[in-house]
Amino acid sequence: MTTYAVTAATGHFGQTALKTLAGLVPATNIIALARNTKKAEALVPAGVTVRPGDYNNEAELTASLAGVDKLLFVSSQPGGPVDREQQHKNVVNAAKAAGVSYIAYTSFPHADTATSPLSADHKATEKAILDAGIPHSFLRNNWYLENELDSLKGAQAGRPFVYAGGDGQVGWALEREYAEGAATVLASDNQKDIYEFSGAPLTYKQLAAALPGNFDVQAVSTEDFNKGLQAAGLDEGTAAVVTMIQQLILDGELAKTSTDLSEILGHDLVPLDAALAEVLKA
């Protein structure tokens, strides 16, 4: 009997992955790891066991991973009191100590060749998994369509759709599609070492054209984009991170896409118009 575990079980990605996984394997064979176990117990599918899963606590993680064969390791959010690279090392160390035999890790697009600072923690985590000698799949997720929600909602309200990514292409897909893909990989008997998960390559101009409504589309420089964010009330640090994302898109770091996601799911991804409607409705 194979035992599966999913980290970050209370997040949107983790919740979707758990629901998908519970449709592929017996729920009684699944363990949900969460920092807030009470919250997790109210969210997980019936039959799933909940255990503590604080990325800051390696000893706790080691105990919670006891008996786990296959782990879906969902990357944490940066900016916490413990830096993300260390959090991820804690998870990898715990998995090795607990005898986990396989890890599927949600990584960054083309992490081995990416140059953006946003890829650094993912590069380090992939290396830690390789150094630990644990069989793995790196699930290199391109970009969630939900990441553009503020711009999409603003345009729907009649405000300008502003971007600085130029003609850079992005492989947008719904977060739930990435999560469903991750769970499917975890439940599979034959996994690849690397999956470059993405949707079809599109530019911001194409994204805006698919969005219904009456609004202006404004392509600006990264400098002007940053100034606009700060003028709208974002602090300097946050504005810099958001602008960095536009820069990496401008530099083409999200342009290399693949069909790995649709292939593992066994069907086409949600068409762009329907995906936009789903994001805006949510």
Image (cartoon, rainbow, N blue to C red):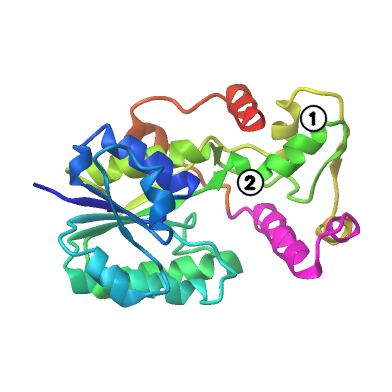
83 or 209, nearer to the observer: 83
106 or 9, nearer to the observer: 9
Q: Is residue 37 left or right of residue 191?
A: right
What residue is drawn where x is 91% and y is 58%?
231
Question: Was residue 180 drawn as part of the magenta stretch in this picture?
Answer: no
Local packing at callout 1 (Cα closer than 10 Å; few below 14, some 14-19, many 20+) is: some
Q: Is residue 76 left or right of residue 167?
A: left
Q: Secondary structure at mark 2?
A: helix
User: What residue is pinned by disc 2?
Assistant: 147
x, y (%) of residue 190?
A: 19, 44
Q: Residue furthest right?
A: 231
Q: Is 128 rendered above or below residue 111?
A: below
Please identify the quadrant where the C terminus is shown.
top right
Q: Are marks 2 and 1 in contact (CB under 8 Å)?
A: no
What residue is drawn where x is 47% and y is 28%?
269
x, y (%) of residue 151?
A: 76, 41
253 or 17, nearer to the observer: 17
What residue is drawn where x is 23% and y is 69%?
63
Segment tinted magenta in the rendering: 229-253
Q: Quadrant of residue 272?
A: top right
Q: Residue furthest left?
A: 1
Upstream in sequence: badge 2 or badge 1:
2
User: What residue is pinned by disc 1?
Assistant: 156
